[in-house]
Amino acid sequence: MPGRLEGKICLITGAAGRIGRALVDGFVEAGATVIAADLVNLEHEAVDPVLCDQGDVESIVKLEEYIKAKYGRVDCLVNNGALGGNRCNVHEKPLQEYEDVMRVNVRGPLLLTQAVLRLHLAEPTRPLSIINMASIAGRRAVSLGSVYSMSKHALLGLTKSVAREYADRNVRCNAISPGVMEVPNMQGFDEESLSKLMSTVPIGRGGKPLEVAHLAVFLASDDASFITGSDYLKVRDGSGRKG
């Protein structure tokens, strides 16, 4: 993997979280120049940390201007930042929670995608890879996690739309939908739901954040130049096939 992304400028959002840090480590190891965006600065000597509220238009405009002035382009965007929301039945969901989750999980990736597309279309000779971190919650109903599930369904829709609209302009867009992960407080799932989900995983364990990062590095690389509009469901943990 070292050198796979040499010379590429990569923007990773939600960089300070567990999966975000693994993505940063994986991309740095692969030789990328990493712009690590989050609400808090990521302490990492090998990256360019930037503060960004991905659901805020002004924040995205400032980020786009900063990248344009310093780097001139983005070769890969990883839309990783997300909110999980509280767990309750649909009729009990506060409208404010819906607005907060959708602002970060749907509006945010859309704004970021628009920003990197504007940079790319100014000089579309270099390939652009966009990777959206979705979820199995974007493929199935999640008990008491309706808003989070809705947001991830929407993100998969954005993935397919971008892949189709920009395929002839040197842009690829794919999604990764992790299954059960070895991270605390996995978004969208309570302890009971996680236990049931784990029982469907033949390999008997959750995925490791760095395993997700390795897949993202592949999708960001030129080795994946023929892959677009795909959703890597459950990162191949075999969920739902046990027994």
Image (cartoon, helix red, strand yellow):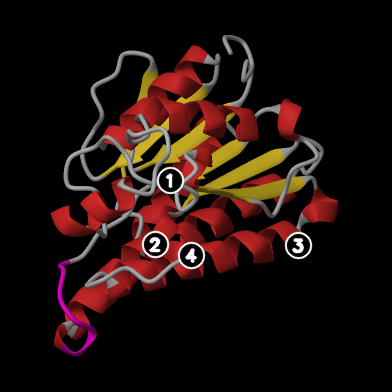
Tell me: 62 left or right of 187. Answer: right
The percent coordinates of residue 91 (x first, y second) are 19, 90
The percent coordinates of residue 146 (x first, y second) are 30, 75
The residue that appears at 58% across and 68% down in the rendered structure is: 157
**Picture quarter containing residue 180?**
top left
Q: Which residue is mark 4?
A: 139
Question: What amino acid is at disc 1?
Answer: Pro
Q: Earlier in the sequence, mark 3 or mark 4?
A: 4
Question: What amino acid is at disc 2?
Answer: Ala
The residue that appears at 62% across and 25% down in the rendered structure is: 8
Dot 2 falls on a residue whose secondary structure is helix
Query: Does the CB distance between marks 2 and 4 fall below 8 Å?
Result: yes
Residue 29 visible in the snapshot: yes
Q: Which residue is mark 1?
A: 178
Question: What amino acid is at disc 4?
Answer: Arg
Dot 1 falls on a residue whose secondary structure is loop
Q: Which residue is mark 3?
A: 164
